[in-house]
Amino acid sequence: MSMRTLITGTGHFVPPRVVTNFDLEKVMNTSDEWIRQRSGIVERRHVEEGVMTSDLAYEAALRAIESARIDRSEIDFIIAATLSPDHYFPGIGVIVQAKLGLVPIGALDVRNQCSGFIYALSVADQYIRTGVYKKILLVAAEVQSTNLDYSDEGREMAVLFGDGGGAVILEPHDSTDGRGILSTHLFADGRHVPDLWLEKPSPKDKPTVTEELVKAKKFFPRMDGRNVFKNATEKMPKAVRIALEHNGLTVDDIALLIPHQANDRISQMVAHNLKIPLEKVMRNIDRYGNTTAASIPIALDEAVKEDRIKPGDIIVLTAFGSGYTWASAVLRW
Ligand code: ACO
């Protein structure tokens, strides 16, 4: 009997402060109409001062643990994905571990930005199927609102991103009923690093932080929006097709497609390219903006709570982001 990895619990947490497009109009030169038309975003959440990524991750983790109906002491490994860790080092995995009182289990940080959740899922899947770990907490969280350029130069990005966290619990499952993670496919093209990145701080500079670099706004994330759009809308459908073919499935078999919530125009293009009806595509970017690594587990948890997923359903995840990296995963729920 072969073992598969099953998601046995999901949870998410977003900070309570809602920031609408109209709120952004007050602090920067933008409009609700521009933001909605280009991204589908209506509002996003921003943390209160002092709240960090590990705080959101911890809250999301608690909810996933409760949903899996396990005691937190049963967790034997943690994987955390974020591009906005509390500190340059260490990552947030160890901080979440300590907050949960789970010393001394291992805690791994995955740094694959918007693809971080699927990359981390693939790592967890290998550990579970090989019997190394029995209950893995995979948590993804971001606090992005505190480091965006709200001037004209950065507004293209500042309107897109939000804060939040999502988590899942992964356990081994005897796969006679066919349930579990069927596949993960990971891709990257490191030639596109400067097309979507946070260039500084970098050890290239000594000292790492200088007034010139701050003035040049090198500590804010930047993207080549058109290039991101073009690549995201090409690469995600391709990754989904490869995954379906690998499993002998077709687009018609998909009960729900959960794309990384990068931008609703991108999600719509992905759906159009795959010829999958929009009713079968999870879209919640209107309420949360782009929460990078956290977007898929947040959307997954909402889909579960909204009863959009039932046991036996084929669920496909796909993501694209900085690196560039992109990925897909097929699950039988
Ligand atoms: N509010 C108002 N105007 C803005 C804003 C804003 N927030 N941001 C940019 N603009 C202005 C620009 O300055 C530019 O003005 P100009 O023409 O006077 O120079 C104009 O709007 C550009 O608008 P468009 O003509 O629609 O530009 P374009 O067709 O190049 O589209 C866009 C730009 C919307 C960013 C597009 O490239 C896009 O959707 N890219 C996808 C990016 C994305 O969603 N990334 C997701 C995050 S990364 C990830 O998760 C993978």
Image (cartoon, grey):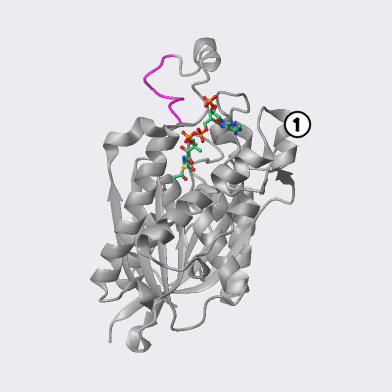
Name the image quarter holding the N terminus. Answer: bottom left
Q: Is residue 205 magenta?
A: yes
Q: Residue at x 53, y 36 (%)?
A: 87
Along the line of sight, which residue is nearer the eye, 6 or 297?
297
Q: Taken as a whole, is the magenta stretch helix, strand or loop?
A: loop
Q: Position of residue 285 (x, y in %)?
A: 58, 53
Q: Secondary structure at mark 1?
A: helix
- Residue 99 shows up from this direction: no
Q: Is residue 281 magenta?
A: no
Along the line of sight, which residue is nearer the eye, 214 or 286?
286
Residue segment shown in magenta: 198-206
Q: Residue at x 55, y 68 (%)?
A: 10
Q: Position of residue 306 (x, y in %)?
A: 62, 73
Give the residue at mark 1: 26
In the image: residue 295, left or right of residue 323 = right
How many numbered marks appear? 1
For residue 179, above or below residue 320:
below
Q: Position of residue 315 (x, y in %)?
A: 43, 72
- Image-quadrant location for residue 51: top right
For residue 325, above or below residue 130:
above
- Image-quadrant location for residue 283: bottom right
Q: Position of residue 227 (x, y in %)?
A: 37, 37
